[in-house]
Image: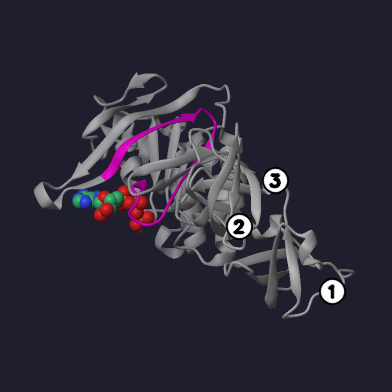
Amino acid sequence: MPEQPGKNAIEVRGVRKVFGTGENQVAALDTVSVSIRENEFFTLLGPSGCGKTTLLRLIAGFDFPTAGEILLHGQDIAPLPPFKRPVNTVFQSYALFPHMTVAQNIGFGLEMLGKSKGEIEARVAQMLRLVKMEALKARRTSQISGGQQQRVALARALAPQPKVLLLDEPLSALDYKLRKEMQIELKRLQNETGITFIFVTHDQEEALTMSDRIAVMSAGKILQVGAPRDIYDRPAERFVADFIGETNFLQGTVVAKKPGLATVKFASNATITAGYPEGFDPSGEVTLVVRPEHADLVPDPAKGTIAGMLSNIVYFGTDTHYHVKLDGGENFIVRHQNSRSSPVTYERGAKVGIQFEEDAARVLKD
Ligand code: ATP
């Protein structure tokens, strides 16, 4: 994706972080570079152990890079200890002081910064309004619910007006319904405060619904950075396509190529022409990816792009999944949205064709 204009809040340049020595060495971050813009809701998304928390800890200053540098508004922040960085962190565990009231917790960071009593009171009142906790300001944090604790943790982190807020899986301790509510709440807080949020999650749906941009990470590397739609519709690598949403993968061989498009032949002799990511030169064995909802079934196999047999139909209420065994032996899923008027025209065992637009498929490295 072309870089959008906008000032960078954080620039991570060639950062490596190695833990341990000798045989026990782990490169938690393997030369990572990324720019995060001002006023952006930016998400680090990836499976457990891919290096998300390590990157947050380096930005916060709790740890130091083995190599590379991190700039905040163009300045190298290496010499700054954590408390001097205009960066605050919200932890998964909230880390509130249970014996203090809600208001005392929120004001704690401001006291540490030596702010005056009047200034602290005014700011705490503003934060209580922002997170809608005015009614509970005098309660101890041991006497409020998990969702309320989460709001207090956010208010406490936002109170000193950091330039950047780091959020390390802040919603993972909440139940499903509360988590959905807090997702909307977090997005609102980011919009209202204009602070850059760097949010860590391994939940792809959470990343897609909340973020302006997402960095998908795997094994210490950033594989792709882009807007949610970009990442979903135009994955740069097989891992990204697999990690985010459901995808059909078809193995094939490149038989023709022109700029931006490759023609791939499959086991059933069908050929498909599709685009591929920048920087990838498709040849030999490749993988074709197609999202289930971007493909259509046609009753006449000859009119489809690939022919097969309907092996299963699974009804999900909002949509139906059609499982197709392709003539070449591969499995393929087509997802159709249901509507009250959608006719049921297919039966298990029927011969069908699968169709999709050229730009619905994508050729990736095998
Ligand atoms: P999770 O989602 O489980 O929190 P993560 O993506 O945040 O995972 P990190 O915690 O950044 O991953 O860890 C990345 C890698 O570095 C892992 O292999 C982890 O075991 C290793 N690692 C992290 N911290 C240390 C440490 N202090 N000492 C040794 N290895 C570490």
Q: Are marks 3 and 2 in contact (CB under 8 Å)?
A: no
Label 1 crowd bin: few (<14), some (14–19), many (20+), radius 10 Å: few
Identify which residue is drawn at 63% across, 56% down.
Answer: 291
Q: Does residue 270 belong to the magenta stretch?
A: no
* The residue stretch that appears in magenta: 28-52
Viewer-nearest of discs 3 and 1: 3
Q: Main secondary structure of the magenta part?
A: strand
Gap in angstroms between the C-alphas marked 1 and 2: 39 Å
Mark 2 lies within 8 Å of ligand 1 (Cβ measured): no
Q: Tell which residue pokes out farthest to the right in this image.
A: 341
Disc on the earlier residue, 1 or 2: 2
Q: Is residue 221 above or below residue 333?
A: above
The answer to whether 149 appears left or right of 255 in the picture is left
In the picture, the quarter occupied by the N terminus is: top right
Q: Which residue is mark 2?
A: 181
Distance between mark 3 and mark 2 Cα atoms: 38 Å
Reading the image, the residue beneath label 1 is 345
Mark 3 residue element: helix
Is tag 3's residue or tag 1's residue first in the polypeptide sequence? 1
Q: How many marks?
A: 3
